[in-house]
Image (spheres, rainbow, N blue to C red):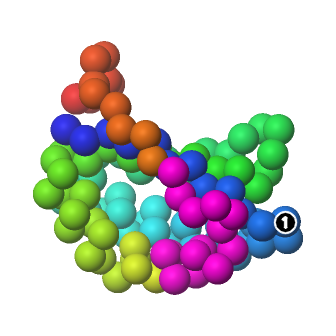
């Protein structure tokens, strides 16, 4: 099982574009065989600071995810509006629901 938390901060005034891109990505990712969970969250103190909580069956499933059209479309849409790229933190499951 692979769990990661991705932090993405977007430029002021680009939130709607970001949400459009991530809607495409979320809808596609949740249908992938190797995806267990894919949630988009935002910082309650900064509406332009987002977190993506992702759980995939394996590293191979995450690699396949990165090849999908919905992921590629999302990246093309958000790369020009992100501040500082995307940071990723990986976790080891301890008490994970439905794991």
Residue 71 place in picture, x, y as percent: 40, 73
Horizontal side of 38 relative to 60 (left or right) equals right
Magenta segment:
74-87
Q: Is residue 24 above or below residue 1?
A: below
Residue 24 place in picture, x, y as percent: 50, 73
Residue 44 place in picture, x, y as percent: 78, 38
Residue 58 place in picture, x, y as percent: 16, 47
Q: Is residue 69 above or below residue 46?
A: below
Q: Residue at 34% of width from left, 31% of height from top?
A: 91
Q: Is residue 77 above or below residue 47?
A: below
Q: Secondary structure at mark 1?
A: loop
Horizontal side of 18 relative to 31 (left or right) equals right
Residue farthest along the top direction in this orientation: 95
In terms of depth relative to the viewer, which is nearer, 81 or 18? 81
Disc 1 target residue? 12
Rendering quarter of residue 89: top left
């Amino acid at each position: 099982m692979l769990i990661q938390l991705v932090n993405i901060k977007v430029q002021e005034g680009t939130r709607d574009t970001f949400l459009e891109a991530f809607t495409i990505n979320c809808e596609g990712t949740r249908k992938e065989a190797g995806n267990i969970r894919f949630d988009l969250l935002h910082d309650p103190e900064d509406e332009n600071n987002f977190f993506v909580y992702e759980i995939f069956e394996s590293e191979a499933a995450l690699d396949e995810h990165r090849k999908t059209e919905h992921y590629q479309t999302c990246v093309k849409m958000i790369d020009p509006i992100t501040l500082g790229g995307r940071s990723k933190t990986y976790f080891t499951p301890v008490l994970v629901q439905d794991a």
